[in-house]
Amino acid sequence: MKQPKPWWQQPGFRVGIALLLLILLGGAVSAVYLTQIPPQQPIAFPHNRHVGLGAPCAYCHPGTAWGPTAGLPGIDKCWGCHQQVQKKSPELEKLAAYVARGGARLLPEAGPLLEQVADVLVQNYPRQIIGIEGHTDSDPVQSGRWASNHQLSVGRAMAVYDYLAARTRLSPRRLFVAGHGPNHPVVSNGTPQGKERNRRVELVVYPEQVME
């Protein structure tokens, strides 16, 4: 009588293992490929200049720490570095404008303005709920940090929330955050000036109140 094959030698099992390996390897190949797709760059990246200045390779290419795929730096990392080192050049001015369109950082002049607005709200609307509502223009997102304009608008609103909650007399209990993406423009997105106006964060006073 012929002895049955062990379970690990059954044809179905071998096919299943082969399919699993193909799926895993396919995922690995995709991961390697995707990490090598360069992010959108508003200016050319002078690699030789950065190496010549002694910039650590692993700072821009963190993948070198755990495998053969080096990885590629995004705009947020480039701009974060240039906030500490060289800040002014014609090319960096292009980078700064690019980050301003697709970023969620507060401009330096935003702090004093937010503090003035917060004082007015505390005096005139001491208990009302206040919505911090972010908006974008109609351009696609330009930073790898955000998957959509809705995420970007929430990020911008959160930057305002963090400042108001930490630096003003507004109680965080009265604040909530919302992101509308490009859904509610105040003017047409047909011009750069219109897009600039549509990239905004609004503080909206609601009639509902919070009992302190």
Image (cartoon, helix red, strand yellow):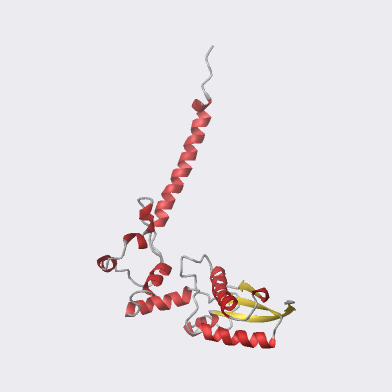
Vertical arrangement, residue 150 with respect to residue 125, above or below: above
Residue 35 shows in the view: yes
Point 51% across, 83% down: residue: 110
Say how many tags the image has.
0
Q: Is residue 70 left or right of residue 206?
A: left
Which image quarter: residue 186?
Answer: bottom right
Q: Is residue 56 left or right of residue 26?
A: left
Q: Please tell me which residue lies in front, 40 or 107.
A: 107
The location of residue 54, given as percent across then percent down, is: 27, 66
Question: Residue 152, position in %: x, y?
Answer: 53, 71
Q: Residue at x 46, y 77 (%)?
A: 100
Image quarter (top left, top right, bottom left or bottom right) of the C terminus: bottom right
Q: Quadrant of residue 174?
A: bottom right
Where's the N terminus, which quadrant? top right
Query: What residue do we see at 44% from left, 44% from top?
Result: 25
Identify the residue at horizontal 46%, vertical 70% (top origin). 142
The percent coordinates of residue 187 (x first, y second) are 56, 84
Position of residue 173 measured from the top left corner of the image (x, y, whole percent): 67, 74
Please indicate, yes or no, whether residue 36 appears anywhere in the rendered image. Answer: no
Q: Is residue 125 above or below residue 59?
A: below
Instruction: Residue lying at the far top in this picture: please name it.
Output: 1
Q: Pick the residue in front: 36 or 155.
A: 155
When the figure is inspected, residue 19 is found, relative to residue 69, above or below; the finding is: above
